[in-house]
Amino acid sequence: MTVPVSADRIVGAGALLAAILAPFYLSSYWVGTLLTQMLFLGIVAASLIFLSAYGGMVSLAQVAVYGIAGFVLGNATTNGNTKGLNLGWSPWIGIVLGIVIAVAIGLLFGALASRSVGIYFLMITLTYSVIANLFFSQVTDLSGFGGISGIRAPNVIGNVEAHQNRLYYVALVTAFGVYLLLRYLVRTPFGLTLQGVRDDPVRMASLGYNVPLHRTVAFGFASLIAAIGGILFVWWNGHVDPASIDLGATIDVLVIAVLGGLYRLEGAWIGALLFVIVNNYSQRIGFIGDRFHTLIGAIFLAIVLVSPSGMIGLWERALSLFSGRRRGPLDRNPIEVGPAEPSV
């Protein structure tokens, strides 16, 4: 019997093929600046969407965690005229340290916020973001306002400016691996339990499940994903400072997730692509200039009014229109009723 191929899979395969071949038909600016940035921002947004769609937790601490990984990597690997510890260790040691410390702090963050829900959880995680920004701003031994410069990628990538395609392909493989890992995780017993905690924590607790522990572990896993995005960011940028994790950067990642769609993992990279393109090209329009956030806010408002499920919701509406059948309830809130496609 032939298994029908869904439109989602066809489009997904086409998008992946287009991404693999991008350096052959797009300019170096598009590949090295726009698409690479889209990939690591999508990874960070995917960590937020994972918590929101499958854990019922909208976190504003993901940028703080990704910044922590970047600062640890910068302090561990730099060895020159820059702020920070300048330990001069191997980039691979810096990667491990950055991820381990970021995940450890993420687990601590998750444990402290695990008994909170809704707006209280949101505000607690926003507090984490503010604390991280102020910490690296004021502790000059680790960063200070000037930040850490001269952060280099491992030799396998080399000089990012000279070999933009190498970092792009590393980011592409990493993003695809993160996507597959998250899709697998939500179908495991832990993932299914987490969705039960999202839907009815009281009932899950009465069945013997440790609700705070599941939320803490989920937050720690999301911190792992965000930390990976932070490593890619400092390689791409070569610099990290407190402005990289300020309130504006925190809101940007939330906007990316909502633009793409808060209940589908694919929305992370769709929203990141839209955000990066608008961000880069709007700067060239004279009357917009520094008013980028006004423009992205208007786009955000328009998309949310038309489709509360973001770009993914628009895609599903298009499929429903052309197929002549409904794909299920559209534009639903993942925090209230869960993801659009059951993970069974």
Image (spheres, grey):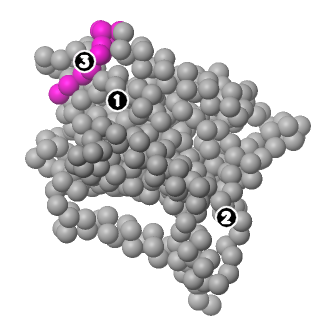
Instruction: Indicate which disc, 1 or 3, sits on the residue closer to the N terminus.
Output: 3
Instruction: Indicate which disc, 2 or 1, sits on the residue closer to the N terminus.
Output: 1
Q: Are marks 2 and 3 in contact (CB under 8 Å)?
A: no
Residue 252 placed where, x, y %? Answer: 44, 39
- Residue 141 as seen in the image, left or right of residue 229: left
Magenta residue check for 318 = no
The kind of residue tagged 3 is Gly
The crowd level at tag 3 (other Cα within 10 Å; few <14, some 14-19, many 20+) is some
Instruction: Indicate which disc, 2 or 3, sits on the residue closer to the N terminus.
Output: 3
Residue that mark 3 sits on = 146
Residue at position x 40%, y 40% in the image = 293
Residue at position x 17%, y 43% in the image = 160
Label 1 element class: helix
Residue at position x 87%, y 41% in the image = 203
Write down the region rendered in magenta.
Answer: 139-150
Say which of marks 2 and 1 sits in front: 2
Residue 55 placed where, x, y %? Answer: 67, 43
**Numbered circle sitting on residue 303:** none
Q: Is residue 11 above or below residue 79?
A: below
Residue 35, by quadrant, is bottom left
Residue 53 placed where, x, y %? Answer: 63, 49
Residue 205, by quadrant, is top right
The prevailing secondary structure element of the residues shown in magenta is: loop
Residue that mark 1 sits on = 244
Residue that mark 2 sits on = 330
Say which of marks 2 and 3 sits in front: 2
Q: CA distance from mark 2 to mark 3?
A: 46 Å
The kind of residue tagged 1 is Ser
